[in-house]
Image: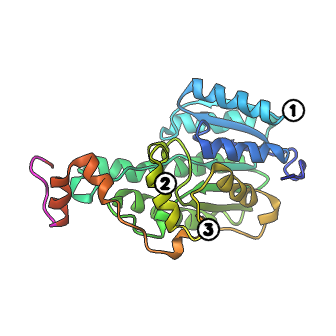
C-alpha cells in the first residue's frame, strides 16, 4: 500500500490513549501523510515505546508525548496545549479512550455502571472542551466508538449505552462546531485486535467463532480502523460531519451472538442463571 505522504503536511494531530493499538496505528497513518503527532497516555513507559516505534516506522516523522489521565480535565487541558505548542496549531484530534467488559445490568452497582458509561464519553467531551478553542484553522475530531452503539451486545449494557451516548455526542458536537469549520465524526469498529481484546484473541476458538459470524469472514486489525480514522481526519472528508462509520466487516448486518459462556466464566453459572430470571444473585448488590 502506498500513501501520498503530503496531504496532511504541516498539520498537528493529537491522539488520546496513545499507547493503544488502534491509537498507535492511527497515529502512524497520520504521520505517513505528513502530520506531526502528539500522543497522550497515562503510562509513561508505554508512551515512550509507542513514540520509538512510530519514529522507526515513519523516518523523519515528528512525535511528542504527554503523560496524563484522559479522564482528568487538568491533564487534558495541559496535553492539548502541549500539542498546540509544537507548531502553534491543532488540526486533528483522535479520541480513542474507552472500553468495557461483559457484566449483566443486575450485577452492576451505581458506581460501576456510571464509571463504564463515563469512560466511553467523558474523555471525548474533555477533548472537545479544551481542544476546540485551539483549533483556530478549523479541523477534524475523530472518535473511536463501537458497533455496540448500534447493536445490543448481550451482557454489555453499560458499554452499549456509553458508546451510543458517544455517537450522539458526536452528532451534537458536529452541529455546534460547524460554524468554526470543525468536523466531528466517529468510527464504529467490530471486534479488533487490541490490548482490550487480547484475552479474546488468545483463545482461538472464540476468535474463529466470532469471525464466522462476520460477513467478510475475519476479525479486525488496528490498520482497518486507522484507515477510516485517516479518511475522516483529512481533506478527503471535508464534506463529512456528524457521522459514525461502521468498520466491522459487515457484522452490523447480522444479529449479535450471545456471550453466555463469558459471563458464566467471570461471574459463575449460578449468577448467569439468576440474572436470566431477572434476579440479583445472592450477595450481589
Near mark 1 (Cα within 10 A), the count class, few <14, some 14-19 or many ≥20, is few
Could you tell me which residue is drawn at 10 percent across and 46 percent down?
Answer: 283
| Distance between the alpha carbons at the discs numbered 3 and 1 | 36 Å
Could you tell me which residue is drawn at 64 percent across and 62 percent down?
Answer: 185
Please give the residue where the numbered disc 2 appears in the rendered image: 207
**In the displayed structure image, the side of residue 8 where residue 212 appears, left or right:** left
Q: Is residue 279 magenta?
A: yes
- The x and y percentages for residue 32 are 82, 44
| Nearest to N terminus: mark 3 or mark 2 | 2
Q: How is the image coloured?
A: rainbow
Could you tell me which residue is drawn at 14 percent across and 57 percent down?
Answer: 280
Label 1's element?
loop
- The x and y percentages for residue 82 are 69, 33
Label 3's element?
loop
Which residue is more in the foreground, 109 or 135? 109
Near mark 2 (Cα within 10 A), the count class, few <14, some 14-19 or many ≥20, is some
Please give the residue where the numbered disc 3 appears in the rendered image: 216
Could you tell me which residue is drawn at 70 percent across and 36 percent down?
Answer: 38
| Nearest to N terminus: mark 2 or mark 1 | 1
Marks 1 and 2: in contact by CB < 8 Å?
no
| Distance between the alpha carbons at the discs numbered 3 and 2 | 14 Å
Q: In this view, does 249 lie above or below 99?
A: below
**In the displayed structure image, the side of residue 280 where residue 244 appears, left or right:** right
Q: Give the range drawn in magenta.
A: 277-283
| Distance between the alpha carbons at the discs numbered 2 and 1 | 37 Å
- The x and y percentages for residue 277 are 15, 67
Please give the residue where the numbered disc 1 appears in the rendered image: 60
Which residue is more in the foreground, 165 or 84? 165
Report the residue that reaches farthest toward the bottom: 253
Q: How many labels does the image show?
A: 3
**Which one is in front in this view, the residue at disc 3 or the one at disc 1?**
3
Q: Quadrant of residue 276?
A: bottom left
Amino acid at each position: 500500500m502506498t500513501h501520498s505522504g503530503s496531504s496532511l503536511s504541516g498539520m498537528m494531530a493529537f491522539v488520546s490513549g496513545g499507547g493503544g493499538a488502534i491509537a498507535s496505528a492511527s497515529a502512524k497513518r497520520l504521520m505517513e501523510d505528513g502530520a506531526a503527532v502528539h500522543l497522550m497516555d497515562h503510562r509513561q513507559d508505554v508512551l515512550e515505546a509507542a513514540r520509538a516505534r512510530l519514529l522507526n516506522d515513519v523516518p523523519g516523522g515528528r512525535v511528542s508525548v504527554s503523560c496524563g489521565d484522559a479522564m482528568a480535565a487538568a491533564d487534558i487541558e495541559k496535553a492539548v496545549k502541549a500539542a498546540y505548542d509544537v507548531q502553534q496549531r491543532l488540526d486533528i484530534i483522535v479520541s480513542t479512550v474507552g472500553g468495557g467488559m461483559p457484566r449483566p445490568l443486575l450485577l452492576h452497582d451505581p458506581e460501576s455502571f456510571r464509571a463504564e458509561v463515563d469512560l466511553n464519553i467523558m474523555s471525548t467531551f474533555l477533548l472537545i472542551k479544551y481542544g476546540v478553542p485551539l483549533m483556530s484553522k478549523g479541523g477534524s475530531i475523530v472518535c473511536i466508538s463501537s458497533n455496540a452503539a448500534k447493536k445490543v451486545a448481550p451482557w454489555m449494557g453499560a458499554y452499549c449505552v456509553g458508546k451510543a451516548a458517544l455517537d450522539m455526542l458526536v452528532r451534537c458536537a458536529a452541529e455546534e462546531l460547524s460554524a468554526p469549520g470543525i468536523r466531528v465524526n466517529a468510527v464504529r469498529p467490530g471486534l479488533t485486535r487490541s490490548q482490550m481484546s487480547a484475552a479474546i484473541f488468545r483463545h482461538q476458538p472464540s476468535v474463529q467463532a466470532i469471525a464466522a459470524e462476520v460477513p467478510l469472514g475475519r476479525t479486525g486489525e488496528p490498520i482497518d480502523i486507522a484507515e477510516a480514522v485517516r479518511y475522516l481526519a483529512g481533506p478527503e472528508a471535508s464534506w463529512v460531519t456528524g457521522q459514525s462509520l461502521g468498520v466491522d466487516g459487515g457484522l452490523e448486518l447480522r444479529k449479535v451472538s450471545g456471550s453466555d459462556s463469558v459471563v458464566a466464566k467471570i461471574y459463575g453459572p449460578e449468577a448467569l442463571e439468576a440474572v436470566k430470571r431477572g434476579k440479583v444473585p445472592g450477595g450481589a448488590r
